Image (cartoon, rainbow, N blue to C red):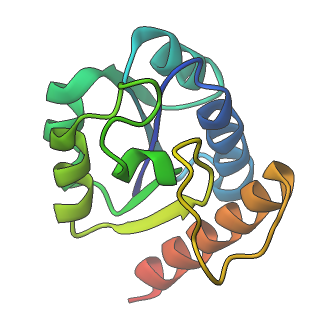
């Protein structure tokens, strides 16, 4: 099972997700960290990712090969993260056959109707639970 965590800026969210996934899924699951910049990728690698890569080319190459993508909603909003999210990144993520677990965090003033107002900690716990369920369903199939 290949799980991909995508993050940018300082990689803080990605670190927490990678660490939580490593704890939740153990060593049998391959966690690939993709950063929109070097700082984010390095932080996620240090948090326990098996591999880390940086930039649009890496994202374009790796995303179609994973089973689950975990990221913030920003990763499907072109121009988000102070411009780090390009339309090419958005297209690759949305075109992927992988299950996408997106945390509804954004600074682009996009409101997702039907989502509850939750803390970042609560969103991370919920996303880890969804990824665990997706991994278990795939492994049992």
In this image, 12 relative to 89: left or right? right
Q: Residue at x 26, y 54 (%)?
A: 93
In the visual, does 97 lie left or right of 79? left
Q: Is residue 40 above or below residue 71?
A: above
In front: 122, or 141?
122
Residue at image position (51%, 45%) is: 108
* Residue 5 rendering spot, x and y as whole percentages: 47, 43
Q: Is residue 1 at all visible to an observer of this figure?
A: no
Q: Give the side of residue 22 with respect to residue 116, left or right.
A: left
> Split into 4 quadrants, where in the image is the C terminus?
bottom left
Viewer-side residue, 114 vs 30? 114
Question: Which residue does the image show at 65% across and 31% down from the upper left?
Answer: 15
Residue 90 position, x and y percent, is 25, 49
In the figure, residue 17 lies in which quadrant?
top right
Q: Farthest residue toward the bottom? A: 141
Q: Position of residue 104 (x, y in %)?
A: 60, 60
Q: Is residue 64 above or below residue 8?
A: below
Quadrant in the rendering for residue 139: bottom left
């Amino acid at each position: 099972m290949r799980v991909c965590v995508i993050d940018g800026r300082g990689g803080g969210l990605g670190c927490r997700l990678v660490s939580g996934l490593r704890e939740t899924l153990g060593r049998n699951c391959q966690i690939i960290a993709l950063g929109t910049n070097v700082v984010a990728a390095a932080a996620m690698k240090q948090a326990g990712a098996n591999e880390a890569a940086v930039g649009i080319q890496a994202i374009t190459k790796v995303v179609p090969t994973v089973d689950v993508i975990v990221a913030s909603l920003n990763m499907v909003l072109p121009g988000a993260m102070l411009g780090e999210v390009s339309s090419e990144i958005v297209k690759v993520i949305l075109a992927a056959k992988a299950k996408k677990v997106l945390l509804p965090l954004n600074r682009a003033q996009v409101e997702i109707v039907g989502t509850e107002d939750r803390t970042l900690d609560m969103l991370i716990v919920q996303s880890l639970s969804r990824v665990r369920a997706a991994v278990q369903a795939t492994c049992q199939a």
